[in-house]
Amino acid sequence: MTIATGSVATSTDQLQIHNANGYLRLAAAATLTLVSDGITPTQNFNKVATEGSASTDTCTTIAVTNATPGFVLVLVPATAAHTITFTDTATPATNTLSLNGNFTMTGTDCSLTLIYNGTSWVELSRTPNISTGKVIALTLLFA
């Protein structure tokens, strides 16, 4: 959005973020490695890797560095060989996950989409690994 010198943006103005074709576009996924059951996202779209040489790991927290309320985070596994369980927190607290139950991410065709509410990360959708076909949207949650 460009605002000319001397002009003012008002509440009726709209900011649209899209590429030349009109689609939302996220940067290529960065890889985040779990450390003490937590990750620190560097952008909206991230691959998640297990700590060290472990084939399974757990994520219980997501640190907030650049995120403000409304920040959308899409997570996918870094490799099909890793199994990562994202753990739901019964009582949401700073940097915890508020999910529709625990989610085990196995395989390359799964994802977890979260939104930051200013305190914790709330699940928007999840796609589990499936052996045949593709899922467009499995769950969509609204609190």
Image (cartoon, grey):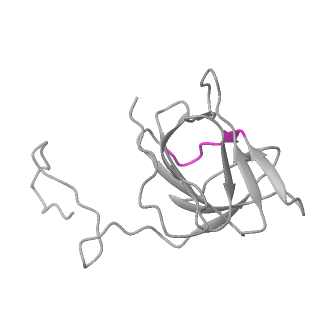
Q: Residue furthest top?
A: 91
Q: Main secondary structure of the magenta part?
A: loop
Report the quarter where the C terminus lies: top left
User: Image height check: is 61 above or below 43?
Assistant: above
Where residue 120 sits: x, y (%)?
56, 33
Q: Residue at x 68, y 39 (%)?
A: 61
Q: Residue furthest right?
A: 53
In-front residue for pair 3/25: 25
Residue 55 in which image quadrant: bottom right
Report the quarter where the N terminus lies: bottom left
Query: How many numbered marks appear?
Result: 0
In-front residue for pair 92/17: 92
Q: Which residues are magenta?
A: 60-67
Residue 53 in which image quadrant: bottom right
Where residue 91 sits: x, y (%)?
62, 20
User: Image height check: is 33 above or below 79?
Assistant: above
Q: Residue furthest front?
A: 132
Q: Is residue 120 left or right of residue 87?
A: left
Where residue 17 sits: x, y (%)?
29, 63
Where residue 115 sits: x, y (%)?
47, 43
Is 108 included in the stretch rendered in magenta?
A: no
User: Image height check: is 57 above or below 18?
Assistant: above
Q: Is residue 37 left or right of residue 77?
A: right
Q: Residue at x 59, y 58 (%)?
A: 42
In-front residue for pair 63/9: 63
Q: Residue at x 12, y 45 (%)?
A: 10
